Amino acid sequence: MKPYFITSTGTNIGKTYLTKLIIDRCRDLKLSINAIKPIISGFDINNYKDSDTGLILRALNKKNIDEVSPWRFKTPISPDAAAKIENTSIDFFELRDFCEKKIKENIINNSYFLIEGVGGTMVPINDKYTVFDLIKTLNIPIILVIGSYLGSISHTLNVLENIKNSDIKLDSIVISQSENDDVGENLTVSSLSQYTQDVPIYFINRNEKNNNHIIDQILKL
């Protein structure tokens, strides 16, 4: 069992939806699973249960918000800007240490472990570092979540170019069906496959009640 960093081409693409599907599937199969979303913006403590953090906590059957999302900001904008509004900033190395500690704990416990990023890969964490910098530092495999909306291919290729120029392992690409499903599964897969070579591409249908067979393939069960 190994850790994964779940990132995406942008915000509201489907990272938390996938995170929750993986948690639910592992719990159904009695497999040890843990997950964090260290940074979240647009967080309202008085109405957090339907937030990304709240959904992850519920899926894990946990209650400790700090354990999943220590860096929380109220304004729904990039975390660097949200932190400035609250007269604070995110210490990148403190964030890195938090994630590395969690990774080690879950390796010892032989547990699947998910780190869900905030927004897309190039979202600024502070004035100096982005989510992509965190991924490079942690050096764990990526599950890249993309949409099926018009423009998704271009956004995805930009991310793939960054990954190609780094030592990061792209484990898989997951197409999370967009609300405006302009392109669809077949065209998205065929367009991307010529650029991804040996990287598996999966499609999560939001209208399907059961995507367990896809999750099993992602986790190589």
Image: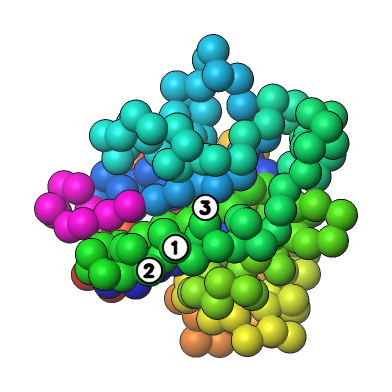
Give the residue displayed 77% in from the left and 44% down from the top: 89
Extreme residue toward the top, this view? 46
**Above or below, comparing residue 207 to residue 113 in the picture:** above
**Residue 31 is covered by the magenta coloring:** yes
* 52 vs 219, nearest the viewer: 52
Amino acid, disc 3: Glu
Residue 113 in view, yes or no = yes
Name the residue rendered at 66%, 62% in the picture. 93
- In the rendered image, the residue lying farthest to the left is 30
Where residue 102 appears, x then y in whole percent? 41, 59
Element class at badge 3: strand
As shown in the figure, which amino acid type bears the numbered disc 2?
Lys
Q: Quadrant of the N terminus?
A: bottom left
In the image: residue 39, left or right of residue 129: left
Residue 130: image location, x then y, percent:
75, 60
Q: Position of residue 207 (x, y in %)?
A: 40, 38
Label 3: how many residues lie within 10 Å, few (<14), some (14-19) or many (20+)?
many
Residue 116: image tag: 3
Q: Mark 2 points at which residue?
A: 104
From mark 2 to mark 1, how far is it between C-alphas? Answer: 5 Å
The residue that appears at 78% across and 37% down in the rendered structure is: 88
User: Which of the labelled discs sits on residue 101, or is there none?
Assistant: 1
Q: Is residue 107 above or below residue 168?
A: above
Quick check: is 45 in the magenta stretch? Answer: no
Q: Distance between the residues labelled 3 and 1?
A: 15 Å
| Residue type, numbered disc 1 | Lys
Looking at the rendering, in which quadrant would you find the C terminus?
A: bottom left
* Vertical comparison of 153 with 13: above or below: below
Question: Total label count?
Answer: 3
137 or 191, which is in the foreground? 137
Span shown in magenta: 26-34
Q: Earlier in the sequence, mark 2 or mark 3?
A: 2
